[in-house]
Image (cartoon, helix red, strand yellow):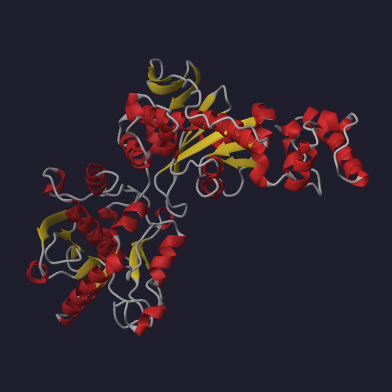
Amino acid sequence: MLTNTFMHIPGVGPNTERKIWNSGCLFWEQALNGASPPISSNVFKKIRHYLNLSNKALGKNDAAFFSRTLPPSQWWRLYPSFKHVTAFLDIETTGLSRYYDDITMVGLFDGVTYRAYVQGQNLVDLKDQLAKYQIVVTYNGTLFDLPFLTSAFDGQLDIPPIHIDLRFLLRRLGFSGGLKAVEKTLGLVRDNEIQHVDGFEATVLWSRYIHGDTDALKQLVEYNMADVVNLKTLMEFACQEMKKRLMSELSPVARKPEQTELPRVALSTNGSHGSLMLSLNDDLAIPIDPSRNKSKTIKIADLFPKLSTLTGHPKVVGIDLSASGKRNTGWALLQGKHVETQVVSSDEDIIRATVNCAPHLISIDSPLSLPHGRDCTSDQCKCRALGITRACERILWKRGIRVFPCLLPSMQELTHRGMELSQKFRSLGYSVIESYPGAAQDILRMLRKKASTEELARGLSDFGLRGDFTSRKVTHDELDAITSAIVGYLYLAGECEAIGCAGEEYLIIPKTVKNLTPLGR
């Protein structure tokens, strides 16, 4: 396709390129050897000059030469001529926030060899390997993979100058949605062992691995490998179909591209050293030391010395509030390492359970205020013009943590209930803070309930908490209530951040992991 291309020449746009093609001049060679398209002689002289430069750049494998003037939407044209300097890339992370989450592994495929770069093991080696390529192909890498990598490497990663994001290229061909949805539409099939794995399950696999399940790392690598190898399949397909459309070929869109065979992944023990070896297709063995992937964070006991001004361990009640008294609300009492939970429903039940234990602090998972300037939750009121989102919610969105605006129609009932309940508690003399368990779990490196309630319960146990939540089947509401209570302890210990603005309730979240003190025990 590249030698059909004239749009990389300054002054040649799609219309001029089409005129050249329609005249029968389809290749650089024809233009250089006497073809006469219906354009001015001066323009054609300029075209020939740049085609000579283009031939030299192609001979030198200089893809960047073409990217400097070829529009990014047309960079796909470079791939067939520069396959040998193309890398297909996909990352796995602990979550969606570049501000709080980490990369767990990166997969790189050059069309022949797949390489895995695992956090804590060989991730730093990615820098030298990626620098060897001139083109990088991703799926949604514009919004996720590449910004995440840039942040993780503090801007010191040399990303190839040409980036082709298949999410947007395939959308132009009529295929939209996530990577696996597009694969399904095109008839690509994954092995049974990884068919069920998605982004959420990938975070669960990493959590299982750092808790000692080394087979989970093998499965995570297999999942990532399927992603990046299928990127090559989709890139080949997209190039063929884009060329058909561009060159007015009327062939129908192929519905099932030829799938690339996946390399084999094996995890074995090195008998002489007792360490693990991750092998890819009997080659590129990577030594794995699971102890290097232990997350550093604080435990509940680390907070106790910071609470010395209080007599004994404080009591903190966490409440995962539901929008209606007819639905379950999670309730938890945290005192020291011990936690008790229950499910309640009505405001009266919530207040009774809380007052009976006389807590030092109440932490509620619900918006407890309105956007600055608003005086009600109604969409029909004039104050609606002041918006539906508070400052704390905008801050979390900027940090990559998804949270619903407090006055979104589906949130209005919850916000109204949370505000009334907090006012009742405060009128009784209790201190109340607003918390958001999802954000707290992200910051404290715990999996959210949506990913896995079992792993969330294990994360709470790893934090040092004790109670029957580890031995009986508790609801996800109770687990979030426990997390809200943890936020209360962090608040009392000064290990928190209050985000928002004056005139609104501040949302209390943990400090980022790197700022928590002390780190681990």
In front: 217, or 26?
26
The quarter in which the N terminus is drawn is: top right
In front: 476, or 459?
476
Q: Is residue 127 above or below residue 418?
A: above
Q: Is residue 505 above or below residue 441?
A: below
Task: Tell whether 385 sits left or right of 6.
Answer: left
Q: Position of residue 442 (x, y in %)?
A: 35, 52
Instruction: Please name the residue shown 73% across and 44% down the image.
Output: 70
Task: Tell whether 119 sits left or right of 124.
Answer: left
Q: How many marks overall?
A: 0
Whether residue 217 can be seen here: yes
Q: Position of residue 296 (x, y in %)?
A: 38, 46
Q: Quadrant of residue 307?
A: bottom left
Q: Quadrant of residue 24?
A: top right
Instruction: Please name the residue shown 56% across and 47% down the image.
Output: 150
In front: 433, or 20?
20
Q: Position of residue 308 (x, y in %)?
A: 25, 66
In front: 353, or 181?
181
